[in-house]
Amino acid sequence: MTHQNHRPGFPHPFSHVAATRVKSRHLRSYIIVGIALFLLIFTPQSGQTKAIDGLFTPSAGTDIAAGHPYSVAYLQALRARERLYELAWSRDMPPKVQDHGASSRIVVADGVTLSTEVLQTVAGPEQISILTINLTRPTLHLGVVQAYNRLISPDETLTSMANRSGAVAGINGDFFEVRGSGVPIGEEVINGKLLHSPNPHFYAVVGVTLSGRITIGPESLLGDVIDGASSYRLFSINHYSEFNNGRLLLFTPALGEPVYVGGDPVAILRPVAGSAAEFTVQAVHSGVDWLPALKGQDALVGSGDAGYWLATTLHRKDRIRLTDRIYPDDQLIQAIGGGPQLVKDGAFYFDPHSPAPGAWDKRNPQTAVGVTKDGTHALFAVFDGRLAGPRRSRGMTPAEVANFMIAHGAYNAMLFDSGGSSEMVARLQGQHAVSIINWPSGGHERPVANGLFIYTTDATHAMAALRNCQLRYAASACTSFLPPG
């Protein structure tokens, strides 16, 4: 049986019994039996996989619930919040949920509410920052921003990305090659353009459809390179870490920097005007060590069998066709990778394809995204951790984050990069620049690869963003913040 540690400041429910001198043997027996029954009912059992008070519902065959020391108060608070949010979403109004007197809400923009909550967990107080977004508001849209607008980069702070793009709020995004190339590991689509294909390991993706709704789940690339009667499967787009894997890779100018290709065959392609899928082969090289930064050109690189096919099939002036389709969501206008997925169809989900498989039972700062069942509201949440902030938050496990997101109305939810990268920013009323809302665990914001941001075409906010951008960046980069018309 797993024993729970009661948090200082909340007296043990039977502490007054321990302090009372019990003279009756029968009374002592009744008390002992009562304590045993209390622990039997309210303490999670080792290996437990069933729902705890209806809140925790792992998929069949998983045991992620085993050994998690949820406090009774924590579960009761989640259940109460779940009921309040069910009522609030049905009335189309963001609920004000008090948690031990430590909750606050402010309106960031029409349809965007920022709140902070403090949960009392068995590990201590946990501070959480939440953005609630009404996706039905015609003035709102979500967008992905890539650090310095190129995949290979020194990475960029979230406040910089938000300010230069005119966002009213946002959170950090995908896992990335920290202290390396800075390239995100998962899919990235910006304004309908695929910059980075889905990770071949089926990591979860947050997608935004043309209608503004959110999808959450794994995506895959289905592609081919066709030259006459011959074709070869296209494995990935701009995944430079996949070199020397015996597959055919495509690189575009979005990569932004030269990359080492180690002598593999390379075909330089020029897009055919007026076509998104047809290219002319400009040159085929072998023995090239470095692929230069691409401008107005794409490049195919192959190794092993793929390299042999490329070198023997493609010739200068060949007109080839590249097909690439994202499955199952091929019409996403914004997409950003992450993982694991935590909530699927309203229940806890153990994602077998996690970018951080060793973190399931660890408390960390966390960044999560969720969407309601009807698709009308999105929830961005950042959980402080590693003793950050005045409340000394220790962080949450993925299972606890899943419980929290379900209790707050999420029908599907997933994690983004977490730890020192976890961050939320928002432009508060009367301010021209965004502020950091949570307490980053490193004591300052970490440069990251990308972020998911909220934008509004409301004239007041758009003009404030425009003025701030003109003060910080080139005026030519700031025209997109004006509302249409």
Image: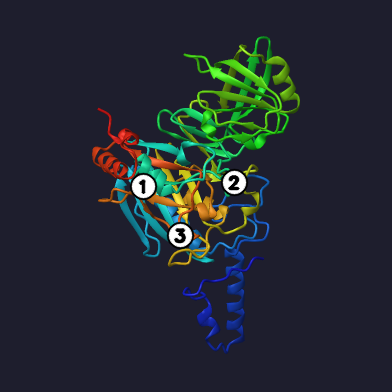
For label 1, count other residues whose C-alpha is less than 10 Å away and answer few (under 14), some (14-19) or many (20+): some
The structure residue drawn at horizontal position 47% and vertical position 51%, both measured from the top left corner, is: 407
Quickly name the residue at label 3: 77
Q: Is residue 249 left or right of residue 375?
A: right
Q: Nearer the viewer, mark 3 or mark 2?
A: 2
Query: Picture quarter containing residue 182?
Result: top right
Specify which label sits upstream in the sequence, 1 or 2. 1
Q: Secondary structure at mark 1?
A: helix
For label 2, count other residues whose C-alpha is less than 10 Å away and answer few (under 14), some (14-19) or many (20+): few
State if disc 2 and disc 3 touch (CB < 8 Å): no
Three-letter amino acid code at the position of disc 2 = Gly
* Residue 139 at least partly seen: no
The structure residue drawn at horizontal position 25% and vertical position 51%, both measured from the top left corner, is: 430
Quickly name the residue at label 2: 180
Count of picture labels:
3
Q: Secondary structure at mark 2?
A: loop
Three-letter amino acid code at the position of disc 3 = Ala
Residue 29: give x, y in percent of width and height. Answer: 62, 80
